[in-house]
Image: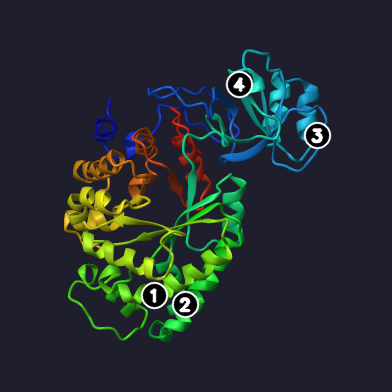
Amino acid sequence: MTPSSAVLALEGPESALPAEAVAPSGSVSPVVPAVLPPPSGAVIQSRTVIKPDLPLVAKAHVDRAITGTGPLLLVRDELTFDVADQALQERAVRAVVVRSGTQLPDHARKMLQESGKVLVLSDEPLDRLRDGGQYQVDASGLVDLERLAVPVTAICSHLNEENEALYKAWNVRDVGYFRLKFCLFQLLATEPGAYQDPHRLETAFTERLRQLVAQGWRRVRIVLSDPTSGELRQLGLAVDAEDNPELGVRGPRAAELWWPEINAIRTVAAEAPDIQIQVSVPFVSNIDEFAAVVAMFNKAGLRKRVELGLTVEVPAMVYALPTLLERHRPGFVAVGTSDLFALVNGVDRSHKALRVDPYSDVNRRIVEDICATAAAHDVPFLVCGELRKDPMIARELVRSGCGELIAAASVLEIARMNRAAAGCSREVTR
């Protein structure tokens, strides 16, 4: 099955639901895998018989003596009363995994169940589990977070301590989509006059990017801002009204407004030489617009330090993309489905009475075409927006060559993308 035909076979978000028994937290039930290709090496063939409220991440602990802080996944040959007691006595232990096929003493199992401990049966030899390795424990079993086929990256433009801690706990090490537009909105909400002050904008962007790189990410992908006149007017700015702001002067059509952002990126790139920095140019509608931004980065002395790519959101770029990839060889292609689908379907995305079905045949097909074009030119690609949240479509994207899956700061979303990134056949449920 080709990636294209696989995605087209879907009927929408409901089709991504697994053929898996969904049981309440703490209950015991069998797990029936969906019919999909074999999983990758990241998936530990296993099943969860006492399920967690939410997926969790834990370090495998093989030694007899419990040391270190949790959460821990206690690895034991079989479930005995001694093992159950050890799990109950140690608060750091969140889950226990034992060999499938061994006896499960009923009361030992109930001791775990009533104490909120998770129990997993492994169909594989337990030496698959590395002492200290990080594993996702969910309603379907175990996933090795250090052996995913592609990385799961963060899509979050407000990386406070809580969000940072969540991502790091789940072994997310790269920021896949950091929108400067959201940083701009936060600034203008309290300082609307800053929009006319390039120095203030540069200072604010520099501060936010310094905070970002100080968190120790391996790679960050920064998306230049592209506010519409309608959004700016909602923030109280006295800008010219446009009949259709979504199609007006925004992004590369007002590229000179990006200098404060480019200057901030230059400052932070010099201060953090060990962090890989990528920059995405949004709302590109023709090749000349992208070429003009490339020239701006060259002028700023950033072309060798920063990897420049683009977010495909304007339908015209679907047809211009092959030529752009040949001429400019961008570092990556992102598919921005929110704007793209609105424009393809002729829908105002802010209209209360109108909506776009991201899973329609047309919308899926256009994403497939973009991804196929990028893959044919050996350019990494990723997908943003609602479509990428569908676990089955995310799995097909990985199979078609997608270089990463992005996830918001949500335990369930990160866990679902981890399973998709592992290419596994089971879905994450509560």
Cα–Cα gap, marks 4 and 3? 21 Å
Eyeballing the image, is 314 above or below 380? below
Cα–Cα gap, marks 2 and 3? 50 Å
Give the residue drawn at x 47%, y 59%: 305
Mark 1 or mark 4, earlier in chain: 4
- Name the quadrant containing residue 262: bottom left
Cα–Cα gap, marks 1 and 2? 8 Å
Tell me the tag on residue 122: 4
What residue would you read off at disc 2? Answer: 202
Q: Amino acid at mark 3?
A: Ile
Q: Secondary structure at mark 4?
A: strand
Where does the image place residue 355, in percent across and percent down from the top left? 24, 55
Q: Are marks 1 and 4 in contact (CB under 8 Å)?
A: no
Q: Are marks 2 and 3 in contact (CB under 8 Å)?
A: no
Mark in front: 4 vs 2: 2
Mark 1 or mark 3, earlier in chain: 3
What residue would you read off at disc 1? Answer: 259
Q: Are marks 4 and 3 in contact (CB under 8 Å)?
A: no
Q: Secondary structure at mark 1?
A: helix
Give the residue drawn at x 45%, y 33%: 427
Where does the image place residue 418, in percent across and percent down from the top left? 49, 39
Q: Residues within 10 Å of mark 1 (few under 14, many from 20)?
A: some
Mark 2 or mark 3, earlier in chain: 3
What residue would you read off at disc 3? Answer: 66
Q: Secondary structure at mark 2?
A: helix
Q: Residues within 10 Å of mark 4 (few under 14, many from 20)?
A: many
Q: Secondary structure at mark 3?
A: loop
Q: Amino acid at mark 2?
A: Glu
Cα–Cα gap, marks 4 and 2? 53 Å
